[in-house]
Image (cartoon, helix red, strand yellow):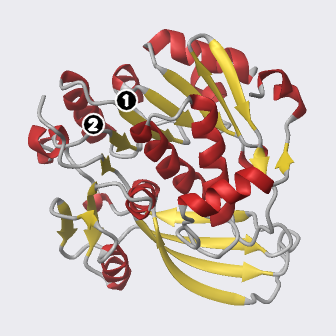
Amino acid sequence: MSEPRFDVVGVGLNATDTMILIPHFPSYGGKVPFLEEVLSPGGQVATAVVCCAQLGLRTKYIGTIGDDERGRIQWESLQGTGVNLDHVQRRENTPNQSAYILIDQTTGERTVFWSRPEGLRIDPEEITPEQITCAGLLHIDGHDTPAVAHAARIAREHGIPVTVDVDTIYKGFENVLPNVDYLITSSEFPERWTGEADPVKALSLLQDTYGIKVAAMTLGAHGALARVDGKFVYSPAFVVNCLDTTGAGDVFHGAFCYSVVKGFPIGEALEFSNAMAALNCTAMGARGRIATTEEARALISRGERRVKQEFLPYRV
């Protein structure tokens, strides 16, 4: 197999967000003045790939962008990042995926309202083997499920590891999972998919059913839990002055991709990804503060952790 041209190729979503900072959430039917409004580019895979590029990896993004003002903002945000954009399609007469994100100033937690026009859908036949086989690692989400399933099959056929970011149930996602090496889900996904409320049992079931190398879940403010080689590894989150949690998971995934490329052990990969996600929460926007490896290492060495007690037996 020839040397890959790119360390990471990402196939999936981008979005342009309107961030609205509010002092606190009002009661149902109430109202509060907002403090700040910011237009900010983001999106699951686009942000992860940008994170990888800023950490020094060779990256490529495959996705679609609308031709409206939000699409222009997204396109311009990707310029100069070092990400290869040769197979980003700019769809005519189609608005870009967008989101309105309410950020509670008291906690930094966000509530998201989003829309993605059908005209942005990627079809499987639009992804050729050459777009995937140039990768050392493929990163996908679950949204255009037939397309990402096709991309993952190509990767598996050519011995390219696949990481996936999935936070909800997508029709046909069972066609993606058999070709995934690193599954990192939201905290809700394992139970929704398996029907098993115990996260330890749910991750075990997912890993054993689909033969996944690493099955993991992010836990928000409490870190991440992973199962590898039949054993669980828990990495607590870092305590920071949180301004906005938007994009924290996307940056986590980007940092995890970086960790896989660099060959980190799973405990180190989770710790590094938690640190990168935490630092991104200290500024507004999905890509508000994509830190350097040095900044992440500094937080790891001195940072306070927030531990979820039930997973302490698995802490490395």
Front residue (pair 261, 39): 261
Can residue 186 be seen at all in this image of the molecule?
Answer: no
Q: Which residue is mark 1?
A: 172
Q: Quadrant of residue 184?
A: top right
Can residue 108 be seen at all in this image of the molecule?
Answer: yes
First reached walking from the N terminus: tag 1 or tag 2: 2
Front residue (pair 172, 3): 3
Front residue (pair 179, 100): 179
- Residue at the image point whose x is 37% and y is 61% from the top: 53
Determine the secondary structure under disc 1: loop
- Tag shown at residue 146: 2
State yes or no: discs 1 and 2 in contact (Cβ < 8 Å).
yes
Q: How far separated are the C-alphas under marks 1 and 2?
A: 7 Å
The crowding category of the residue bearing disc 2, from other C-alpha atoms within 10 Å (few below 14, some 14 to 19, many at least 20), is some
Determine the secondary structure under disc 2: helix
Where is residue 155? Give x, y as percent.
24, 31
Q: Quadrant of residue 103?
A: bottom right
Where is residue 39? Give x, y as percent.
52, 83
Residue 304 versus residue 146 in the image, above or below: below
Residue 143 versus residue 23 in the image, above or below: above
